[in-house]
Image: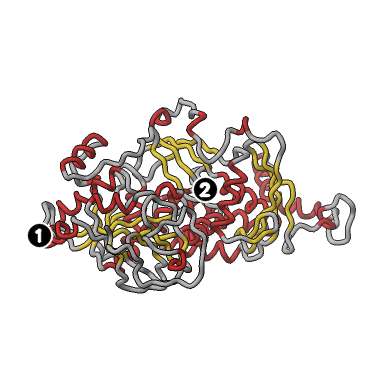
Amino acid sequence: MAQLKAISSYSSLNLEFHGHKRDGSLHNHKPSSTQKSVTSFQVLGAKWSDLRGCALLGSTRNVLRTRCNKAIQAVLSSDREVETYEASKSKGLRGRLNKVVLAYSGGLDTSVIVPWLRENYGCEVVCFTADVGQGLKEFEGLEEKARASGACQLVVKDLKEEFVRDYIFPCLRAGAIYERKYLLGTSMARPVIAKAMVDVAKEVGADAVAHGCTGKGNDQVRFELTFFALNPELNVVAPWREWDIKGRKDAIEYAKKHNVPVPVTKKSIYSRDRNLWHLSHEGDILEDPANKPKKDMYMMSVDPEDAPNQPEYVEIGIESGLPVSVNGKKLSPASLLSQLNEIGGRHGIGRIDMVENRLVGMKSRGVYETPGGTILFTAARELESLTLDRETMQVKDSLALKYAELVYAGRWFDPLRESMDAFMGKITEKTTGSVTVKLYKGSASVTSRTSPYSLYRQDISSFESGKIYDQADAAGFIRLYGLPMKVRAMLEKGI
């Protein structure tokens, strides 16, 4: 059984941890208010009164989520603790590291990476899992998996609000879309996870970080550029670029050899990445761009053909370029996006099928579901039609392409992106108002937009004569505006 031991307090981390003492009681951590568990209450052998201030994450094991501004680290103690300690004293097959923080999902690859790191680098392994909205099911049994793989510690951190507020919303404000379609769901999630890993590495005294990204994808770049930017002294280990494991069969054999239980979850035929912003699908029949996606592949949205026959109208409130409310109700960033995902999903909104150019040079085909994000992009761009003048809008749109490219390439902490973000924040200061979007069988169309800072003037735009705009003034304007064209024509005709 795992032993929970509070060893430090950091107000900025707000971590979640797994584990309990051998006697079944909680450690001396007494939160301040009561929240309802999302599962039946059988946690850590404690009474309900002992969990004041802590909400529980749905799991088959014991999971404690602290809502206090304190970090509690869980040290997993088991029969493997002595083995881990002995391994950490000697040099591994490839070198010597003290402690490694591993980006951990609990799947086959990361389960195998744990013993591989210990064998090859003689190190302790701290497993880190980020909650970016992938769903409670992904957290079931993580403690058992981490301990069975040989990890000395498991840290889970809730990043949902930070993810939406500090990564998704800035991209939304910038209008960042990669190659005309992709709303950057995975691209935005990697730097927030990597940043948290750097924080945890400092907290636990690790000298290295590791990830399970393959050598063919974009994610390896996104993780490692973040590590470089935030702590260049950390060593980075990427097993897929080092080991001899070539695929699932090799990984299973390695797991059996090192007594690591193979995860029994059903292997999907697709490679998927899910977070609060989107769900991506790659692999299997999608590898041929000529193949149509199967209807049962989608998980966040219904088929537009099966969506309700009646449209639904949703009003998005925006302040300074950032969403703040849905249908007049103010919500936190993560709650707002979650609600729009549900609304958009039932109307089949936000399905994208595209062939994109990966950073590493190859093309790949992916299918994305981004229901809430599609609604927000539609609303934000429409409100800008009222609040931005022509020149500003053109410059913003041109910079949005570069902004998207930087995010896609993993350069979130690049000074150029940060400077561009400051520009986007400045020019959208007056982008405040509301937009009503009609959702109907896969389409999201704007029906209304209002802003107290609107540059649209009905008294000027009206076809009726007005005092501000004298139509006779247009003649002189046209003659001056077209003068270069007229001079060139005169030259060609010898006039």
The residue nearer to you, when weighing 74 against 270, is 74
Q: Is residue 229 left or right of residue 78?
A: right
Residue hosting label 1 = 90
Q: Quadrant of residue 308?
A: top right
- Quadrant in the picture for the C terminus: top right
Amino acid on which the number 2 mark rests in the picture: Ile
User: Residue shown at 59%/46% (left/top)?
Assistant: 342
Does the image show residue 366? yes
Number of other residues with Cα within 10 Å of mark 1, as a class: few under 14, some 14 to 19, many 20 or more: some
Determine which of the numbered discs, if any, sits on residue 252 in the image: none
User: Residue shown at 32%/60% (left/top)?
Assistant: 19
Kindly state the secondary structure of the residue where label 2 is placed.
loop
Amino acid on which the number 1 mark rests in the picture: Ser
Residue hosting label 2 = 177
In the displayed structure, 70 sits above or below 273; it is: below
Residue 222: where, in percent of width, then height? 36, 53
The residue nearer to you, when weighing 30 against 431, is 30
Residue 112: where, in percent of width, then height? 24, 46
